Image (cartoon, rainbow, N blue to C red):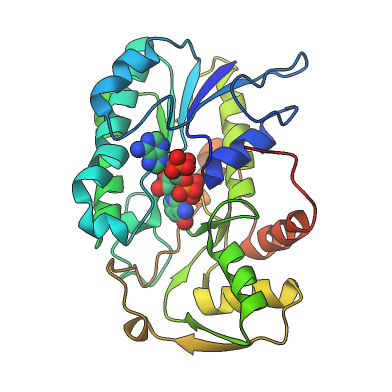
Amino acid sequence: MKVLMVGETGQLARFMQITQPQSNNRPNGSTQNKDSKVELVCLGREQMDLSQPERINDILAGYTFDALVNAAAYTAVDKAESEPDLAQMINADSPAELAKVCAERDVPIIHYSTDYVFSGDASRPYKEEDATGPNSVYGQTKLAGERAIRGAAEKYFIFRTAWVYGELGQNFFLTMRRLAKQRDSLSIVNDQMGGPTYARSLAECSWQIIDQLDQNVERPWGTYHMSCAGEISWFEFAKALLTQSGFSNIQLSPLTTAQYPTPAKRPAYSVLDNSNLAKALGVEMPDWQQALASCIQHASTPTTLVL
Ligand SMILES: NC(=O)c1ccc[n+]([C@@H]2O[C@H](COP(=O)([O-])OP(=O)(O)OC[C@H]3O[C@@H](n4cnc5c(N)ncnc54)[C@H](OP(=O)(O)O)[C@@H]3O)[C@@H](O)[C@H]2O)c1
């Protein structure tokens, strides 16, 4: 099966490459080997710039594929507040074009969205059908992307995830570990609850689902939540990850959101209920504790993926 992936250098894109079924972990371009069921071709920003939705049709004309994965997005949550048009093009207008081409060719599109489509006012994990109400430009543009895909294609999976981290890329996990080496104390927000999601788990789970596409059977297309199970605050997550990473001496202090103002408003509670993923697609994400332990273990061993 030929899988075309938009995105090459982001967290999810990298872990998709590392975890592709029976892969040789080769970094760029076609990564098929003779035993692999999947041929993964990655389109980095140089091959496809999502800020130019008008070019997408022509670019895709140069590729054949059985499924398309969009692992790229405008993810600079605070910067998006001052670049709404660019965020809209990358997160909504271009995904709409990708979905149109997929629909024309009758191939599925796999796209990722975010807990930020919700307001964060809930007191129990969000289900897929719960009312959305983003309170940031990033969340609004990601929601617009979801709607565009649902409007353009029938064969789609939209996976909403949250708080993505890993031993590669730019994320909370790596930032905390870097700061712990530089400082004696850290203050971290303690009144935002979510489900920290290891990008490797997200990628592995995605591949399980993509692998089933090869079987030529009808799939329960739709929007699903795909985050690591459980819930925790950023402060408690930082405490867990630093303690388990051997930085037990650092002094951690809890902050309120009001004490740490940011340009984009964050949802106070954005835990996602993943139960539909297991019920409809037979795939379960690990809980955040298991995933964190796995990330820490992987962080201590060098990765073979060089980009
Ligand atoms: N990170 C999170 O905490 C989080 C939470 C919830 C949902 N999500 C969703 O999960 C998905 C994967 O996120 P991630 O964490 O892997 O993101 P990421 O690490 O920030 O990577 C974003 C990727 O998008 C690419 N990109 C940005 N602008 C582009 C453009 N104009 N044209 C082409 N490529 C462009 C980047 O390429 P360059 O390297 O060239 O910039 C990068 O490869 C996204 O849909 C995101 O919205 C993420």
As drawn, 68 above or below 84:
above
Q: x, y (%) of residue 49?
A: 36, 31
- Looking at the image, can residue 130 be seen? yes
Image position of 171 with respect to 53: above or below: below
Q: Is residue 179 above or below residue 56?
A: below
Q: Is residue 245 left or right of residue 220?
A: right
Q: Left or right: where does residue 233 sit relative to residue 83?
A: right
Residue placed furthest toward the right: 301
Q: Quadrant of ligand 1?
A: top left
The answer to whether any part of residue 132 appears in the image is no
Residue in view at x 46 percent, y 24 percent: 68
Q: Depth check: 111 or 45 in front?
A: 45
**Of 126 and 159, the residue lying toward us:** 159
Residue pictured at 28% horizontal, 69% vertical: 265
In percent of the image, x 47 and y 81: which residue is there? Answer: 190
Residue 11 % position (x, y) = 55, 47
Examine the image and state in which quarter residue 255 appears: bottom left
* Image quarter of the N terminus: top right
Can you give x and y, in whole percent of width and height, for residue 199 in the image? 58, 49
**Left of 99 or right of it: where is 171?**
right
Question: Viewed as shown, does residue 90 lie left or right of 270?
Answer: left
Residue beneath the point at 42% across and 80% down: 191
**Figure quadrant of residue 295:** bottom right
